[in-house]
Image: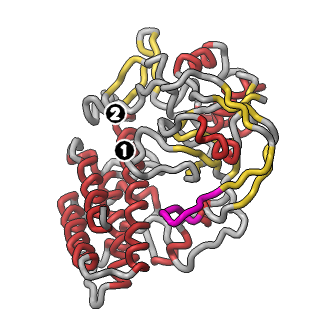
């Protein structure tokens, strides 16, 4: 597949994800961390306009001079922007205008890519494609959060559950010998800067589970009083559950005595065989403590990743999000993509059922705060 085909495939898939939406769904922002679909549609378009068209197309005329202010996310080098909590207040421009914006930018990018583009330009388009793929997953999880906070739990799309995924392997523990291993991306294919540079780490002997924790196992944790036993919780996690009255994973509700959870296909009874999802790091660590086990480090996960199936849930590790040795940020706004977030975040590895196709690899380093759980997150255990 050439770069133009890859670009168009990615752009069209974002639009396809919005097909089931009602017009009112495009603007709602129920939380600071969940951006409205209209904002995602515009922001991913702004990325191509800001970093490619403005720089590489002579005499380029922006679609609308206000869009850079409205749809920049966190790039200080790219100019002023609205605060994140105000993304849901952008009732104007309307949805139709945002779709016009996408078409306008797509037409310009197509013309550029038809003219024997330079490697530098292609590399930026590839970055933009991967950026949009990230937002495709965020788009789905943000839509789910919006609908999941609707009192009637409306369906996004039938047969698009994404939660009722059962383990395809039996739970066993893979033994990994102590030693020095290489970590990080290698090769010429795309990766983010936080996956570089490749370096050596030493690990002790460990045993890692070949299967993710299921809903049945997690229900045992709940019903044994796991959310009420402070001995299981990290201190910040304990205050998090007390302050927020957390008693179960996100989207779980007791209905007539049965555990149910909200899915993109509506409210369903919890499938006990399915892999647990929407778990915070605090919950994952407490569950591991209850099982008298622990979470893997991100290095242990990567070393063993060829020995188990992954990609159903983003898997919490007990590794802080920090730079690898010789990590270097690019100059300007592109350098803000990953490096400036390397504090107060934990690393997740793998991918999820919401991750876009061809957007996963075993060196991928996702990162979120320990309390965040609106992504499709899960738990893999390591024996102590």
Magenta residues span 184-193
**Pick the front one: 355 or 254:** 355
Q: Which residue is drawn at 66% across and 65% down?
A: 197
Residue 117 spot, x, y in % from top left? 33, 80
Report whether residue 54 is seen: yes
Residue 72 is a magenta residue: no
Q: Residue 140 carries which label?
A: 1
Residue 239 point in image, percent of width and height: 69, 35
Residue in front for this viewpoint, 342 or 30:
342
Point out which mark residue 264 bears.
Answer: 2
Distance in Å between CA atoms under marks 1 and 2 = 9 Å
The crowding category of the residue bearing disc 1, from other C-alpha atoms within 10 Å (few below 14, some 14 to 19, many at least 20), is many
Q: In which quarter of the image is residue 343?
A: bottom right
Is residue 270 shown left or right of residue 197? left
For image coordinates 27% across by 45% down, the residue present is 25
- Which quadrant is home to the C terminus? top right
- Disc 1 secondary structure class: helix
Q: Are marks 1 and 2 in contact (CB under 8 Å)?
A: yes
| Residue nearest the viewer, comparing 261 with 298 | 298
Identify the residue at horizontal 56%, vertical 42% (top origin).
Answer: 372
Q: Please tell me whether residue 50 is drawn above or below residue 17 in the rendered image.
A: below
Q: Quadrant of the N terminus?
A: bottom left
- Specify whether 185 is left or right of 24: right
161 shown above or below 124: above
Which percent across, then down, holds residue 304?
65, 40
Image quadrant in which you'd find residue 178: top right
Mark carried by residue 345: none
Q: Does the magenta stretch include residue 190?
A: yes
Q: Is the magenta stretch mostly helix, strand or loop?
A: loop
- Residue 352, given in percent of the width and then of the height, sits at 46, 40
């Amino acid at each position: 597949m050439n770069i133009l085909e890859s670009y168009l495939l990615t752009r069209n898939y974002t639009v396809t994800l919005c097909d089931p939406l009602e017009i009112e769904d495009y603007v709602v922002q129920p939380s600071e961390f969940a951006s409205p679909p209209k904002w995602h549609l515009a922001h991913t378009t702004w990325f191509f306009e800001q970093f490619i068209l403005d720089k590489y197309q002579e005499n380029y005329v922006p679609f609308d001079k206000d869009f850079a202010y409205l749809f920049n996310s966190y790039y200080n080098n790219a100019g002023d922007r609205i605060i994140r909590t105000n993304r849901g207040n952008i009732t104007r421009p309307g949805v139709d205008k945002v779709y016009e914006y996408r078409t306008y930018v797509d037409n310009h990018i197509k013309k550029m890519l038809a003219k024997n583009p330079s490697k530098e330009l292609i590399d930026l388009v590839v970055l933009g494609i991967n950026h949009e793929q990230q937002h495709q997953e965020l788009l789905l999880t943000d839509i789910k959060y919006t609908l999941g906070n609707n009192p009637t739990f409306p369906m996004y799309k039938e047969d698009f559950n994404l939660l009722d995924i059962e383990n395809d392997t039996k739970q066993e523990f893979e033994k990994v010998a102590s030693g020095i291993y290489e970590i990080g991306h290698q090769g010429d294919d795309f990766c983010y800067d936080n996956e570089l540079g490749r370096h050596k780490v030493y690990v002790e002997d460990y045993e890692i589970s070949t299967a993710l924790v299921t809903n049945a196992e997690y229900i045992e944790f709940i019903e044994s009083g796991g959310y009420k036993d402070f001995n299981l919780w990290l201190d910040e996690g304990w205050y998090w559950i007390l302050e927020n009255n957390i008693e179960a994973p996100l989207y779980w509700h007791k209905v007539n005595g049965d555990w149910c959870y909200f899915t993109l296909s509506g409210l369903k009874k919890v499938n006990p065989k399915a892999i647990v999802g929407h778990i915070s790091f605090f919950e994952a660590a407490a569950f591991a403590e209850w099982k008298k086990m622990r979470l893997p480090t991100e290095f242990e996960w990567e070393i063993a990743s060829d020995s188990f199936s992954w990609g159903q849930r983003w898997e919490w590790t007990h590794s802080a999000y920090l730079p690898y040795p010789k990590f270097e940020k690019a100059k300007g706004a592109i350098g803000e993509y990953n490096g400036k977030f390397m504090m107060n975040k934990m690393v997740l590895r793998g991918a999820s059922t919401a991750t876009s196709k061809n957007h996963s690899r075993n060196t991928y380093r996702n990162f979120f705060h320990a309390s965040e759980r609106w992504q499709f997150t899960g738990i893999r255990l390591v024996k102590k």
